[in-house]
Image (cartoon, rainbow, N blue to C red):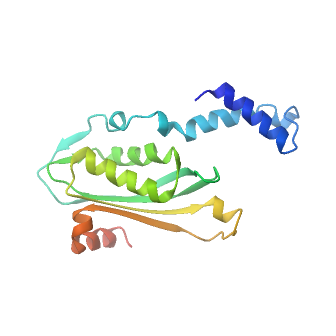
């Protein structure tokens, strides 16, 4: 990302909405916004293999592994407004497990792109399944969308829930129900 170019664009945006980019409170805003967008979109410049960083370990167990309430912050691709919430991940390993922190890092990688929640949920599930050839993966995400809360229909208490189930989580109702019960859904 060319931060200098983004700064120029933000300065022009300030002018277009009727602001004076030279007034005291806005003088450093273009620079701050450029740095903010560099951080909020770093998922485009991050390689999933680097995130996993060989933290794939052999395991005898094929029990269900769950990480709950992983914080999610992303930007809606339709309005460039934030959405935020939690992600719950479960998987049944075949021969390998992921280092625990890698689940959160995978969530972070894909959420730091312009997104829709439906795609984000699927990308996380697919990345985990592919990384360790899991028997099954389930991802449930619950988020609040500022594009729906502070503009448009202005429904401040609305939450969107999405799920992606792959492998045994898709084919086996008992596996899917075990996952949903363990995450409290």
Q: Nearer the viewer, residue 184 or 53?
A: 53
Residue at 24% x, 74% y is 173
Asked where in the image residue 146 lies, by quadrant, the reply is: bottom right
For residue 154, above or below residue 96: below
Q: Quadrant of the C terminus?
A: bottom left
For residue 80, above or below residue 10: below
Residue extending farthest to the left is: 60
Q: Is residue 128 visible?
A: yes
Residue at 57% x, 63% y is 144
Left or right, 171 with reference to 121: left
Q: Quadrant of the N terminus?
A: top right
Residue at 33% x, 47% y is 127
**Residue 176 pos. (x, y %):** 27, 70
Left or right, 155 with reference to 165: right
**Residue 154 pos. (x, y %):** 70, 68
**Residue 101 pos. (x, y %):** 35, 45
Q: Is residue 31 visible?
A: no
Left or right, 51 with reference to 10: left
Residue at 36% x, 38% y is 48
**Residue 10 pos. (x, y %):** 74, 36
* Count of all numbered marks drawn on residues in the image: 0
């Amino acid at each position: 990302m060319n931060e200098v170019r983004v700064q120029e664009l933000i300065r022009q945006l300030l002018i277009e909405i009727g602001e004076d980019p030279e007034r005291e409170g806005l003088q450093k805003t273009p620079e701050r916004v450029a740095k903010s967008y560099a951080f909020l979109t770093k998922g485009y410049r991050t390689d999933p293999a680097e995130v996993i960083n060989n933290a794939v370990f052999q395991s005898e167990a094929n029990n269900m592994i769950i990480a709950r309430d992983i914080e999610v912050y992303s930007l809606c691709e339709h309005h460039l407004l934030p959405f935020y919430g939690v992600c719950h991940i479960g998987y049944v390993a075949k021969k390998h497990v992921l280092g625990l922190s890698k689940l959160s890092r995978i969530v972070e990688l894909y959420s730091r792109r312009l997104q829709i929640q439906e795609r984000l949920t699927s990308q996380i599930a697919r990345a985990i399944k592919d990384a360790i050839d899991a028997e099954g993966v389930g991802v449930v995400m619950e988020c609040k969308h500022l594009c729906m809360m502070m503009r448009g229909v202005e429904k401040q208490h609305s939450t969107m829930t999405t799920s992606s189930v792959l492998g045994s989580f898709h084919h086996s109702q008992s596996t899917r129900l075990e996952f949903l019960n363990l995450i409290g859904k």
